[in-house]
Amino acid sequence: MDIITLARWQFAITTVYHFFFVPITLGLSVLIAIMETFYVRTGDERYKRMTKFWGKLFLINFAMGVVTGIVMEFQFGMNWSEYSRFVGDVFGAPLAIEALSAFFLESTFLGIWIFGWERLSKRTHAATAWLVAIGANISALWILIANSFMQEPVGYVLRNGRAEMIDFGALVTNPHVWLQFPHVFASGLTTASFFVLGISAYHLLRKNQEIDLFKTSFKWAAITGLVAATAVAGIGHVQGQHMIKTQPMKMAAAEALWESEDPASFSIFSIIDEGNREDVYSFRIPNVLSFMAYNRMEGEVKGINDLQKAYEQTYGPGEYIPPVTISYWTFRIMVGAGFLMIFLAALGLWQVWRGHHLTPNRFLKILPWAIVVPFIANTTGWIFTEVARQPWIVFGLQRTEDAVSPNVSAGTLVFSLLSFGLIYAILIGVDIYLLRKYAVQPQLELVSSAES
Amino acid sequence: MDLNTIWFILIGVLFTGFFFLEGFDYGVGILVPFLSRDDRERRLMINSIGPHWDANEVWLITAGGAMFAAFPHWYATLFSGFYLALVIMLLALIVRGVAFEFRSKDENPKWRSTWDWMIFIGSAIPALLWGVAMANIVRGVPIDANMQYVGTFGDLLNPFALIAGLTSLLLFTLHGANFLMIKIEGPITERIKTLTLKLWPLVIILSLIVSVMGYYDTDIATRHAVTALILSLGTIAAISSVGWLIRKKRNGWAFAMTGACIVLFSLTIFAGLYPRLMTSSLAPDAWSLTIDNASSSPYTLQVMSIITLIFLPIVLLYQGWSYRVFRRRLTSTSSLEY
């Protein structure tokens, strides 16, 4: 394999792996802060036990997010030094600001939160939980501001052979990020909600002594899950409409739409032949894609082949088509998983409404397995947004193949790829072992914290 | 002073703060498998840095981010050039971070001792590699006219860098031991004291050697003779006082002096570099990265300066507060989270 392929694999693996732990941190930090606020407001011990129980699982997950995050910050320079030189003037700023305004906040107050139960007043302690949640989500905002520049470059000028920032305000008000951030924030809440729902369902089925804790958790998570999952879909719809204006090739790839159509049809299932630039088979519903794009039944959606021609005129000869099969299927899996979650959360809320969740039933047995659904949606969503931007690393400005470090050998890359792969594989096993252990035995955390 | 110089100083301050703070974290981590008689004592040691290690590591993340934002070429050349060393450091930091969180989450003694060794490895490797890296940055590495590192991993393992690595390893260990002396109580402190007094002369000797080698291996002395001399004398004076202070039971002062030694070493390196960022051994005057040829545009530096001016004081305030919250010593009756 050449160094570009190896560097891309390494980036893909380390990013996707890191992103397993990020959305749940974003969402769960907020839920825990709310739980602790209820404890402070009501003095009800049940909320403290909820905070402690979910807090422990949060921390096991958080540690993985922290350590895999350091790799992210380093590897732009390690594997993508030409990218770093080309966009550092713009892209470095949000990364530095992320560390300064968010990582410090998150890590300092998390330390205080973990160790400060006996040293702070209840109120101050709850405030530290909020600061952790705010820090985590601000960090997501800055990293997405950086990512949005790659999707939709703004606030820059090409000068001295690189992209230089000329308008910081434009960078932070990039329309792309103000759709992407709410989308990720709501995905985080959805992920956390399904985590809480699944584990609560497990305990409701077994009716153990902590039933109050899990009853309340289940109810909360059903509500936040339904609201957040619906919000994700709603924002996603707006994102699609924005994408068709700013990254039409991405939309065309998501739909495996080779030829422009008006009105445009929506593909339910396509077998794609990327070599011949056509669909071997495609089951499509007429007009739906136009509706998704413009909220009306007509309107042209550009196809891949037309866009390729247009891009050749703008950017010169070359291949401007992303991997269509990956784009098409990751998009579909993401959207499918999203709707499945809306459905499951609604069912959960209905069970709460009728009190059905208090008696063992098949739905409760399904929910622990449904914990994986948001992870699938997050992962495919992230892969989609990055892969369907190809061949660009920064849309319209730099190609991925021009971004790689020229002085890192294939052998070195193979070594690092294997090392990270091996460590990550071991750690995911350990992480799941510990999460499962503390999830199924609430007494492990609750008894030990009651003693101290 | 121009913005490029200000950002050079700021990044120097971030690295110096990182070495001071994470220095004792690494030191404690290195000592975890040793000195302790039982699991409780090991937990005491780990919990002494429990509330702080993650936030201390953010000093590095911020320094890296600041390099990327202010001097993209520095970030690109250094990180792609020191690739293998960084992979090893990252692997170490990964296992170290999860080890703190995971080690007490299972009763099995094998589980715990495995993670304790991970804490040791994960602390010792970066403690060593930081010395190696900083020595090479100031000594000079093969960088070509296009700012690309054209050397190998082996080039980084020269005698000066290795001695510097050994120095940072033992100096951080001593710093960690001094931190433990002011943070925990119990019979273990006697063992820490004994170790400190053995380690201390070694660190003095290494500091002397590394200073003398630095005189010959780098051009600090020819470029910044007076500054380098003052800083080196200060370093040696600070480290020489440590054993004496420990014997007098002035533990707080001993900790301050290992800290001063770390800070002065770091300042020597950054003062010696200025106005360079990375020295090219192939053509020091023509191909070195400097605060001018490697920097971001004036606009970006301005924006970043304003943002730093707003956030950095706040960060320092709440991090200071976090040390205040946990100022009390840990004793055998303290409840332990890790």
Image: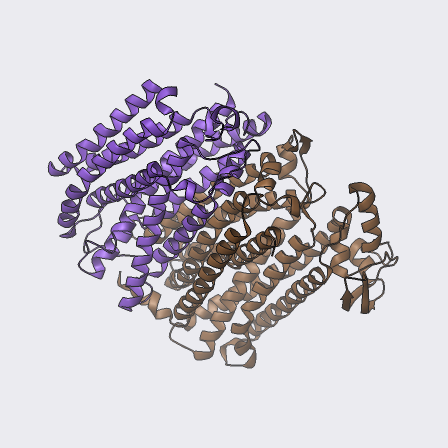
Chain colours: A brown, B purple
Can the viewer see residue A121 in this picture? Answer: no
B89 lies above or below A349: above
Residue at 39 percent of width and 68 percent of height? A438
A210 lies above or below B96: below
Can the viewer see residue B305 in this picture? Answer: yes
For the C terminus of chain B, the quadrant is bottom left
Q: Quadrant of residue B171?
A: top left
The answer to which of B8 and B301 lies nearer the viewer is B8
Q: Quadrant of residue B217?
A: top left
The answer to which of A202 and B76 lies nearer the viewer is B76
Q: Position of residue B228 (x, y in %)?
A: 32, 23
- Answer left or right for A221 relative to A206: right
Q: Position of residue B336 (x, y in %)?
A: 27, 56
Residue at 78 percent of width and 56 percent of height? A252
Q: Position of residue A253 (x, y in %)?
A: 75, 57
- Answer left or right for B53 relative to B242: right
**Extreme residue toward the left, this view:** B248
Q: Position of residue B216 (x, y in %)?
A: 33, 27
The total number of labels drawn is 0
Residue at 35 percent of width and 52 percent of height? B122
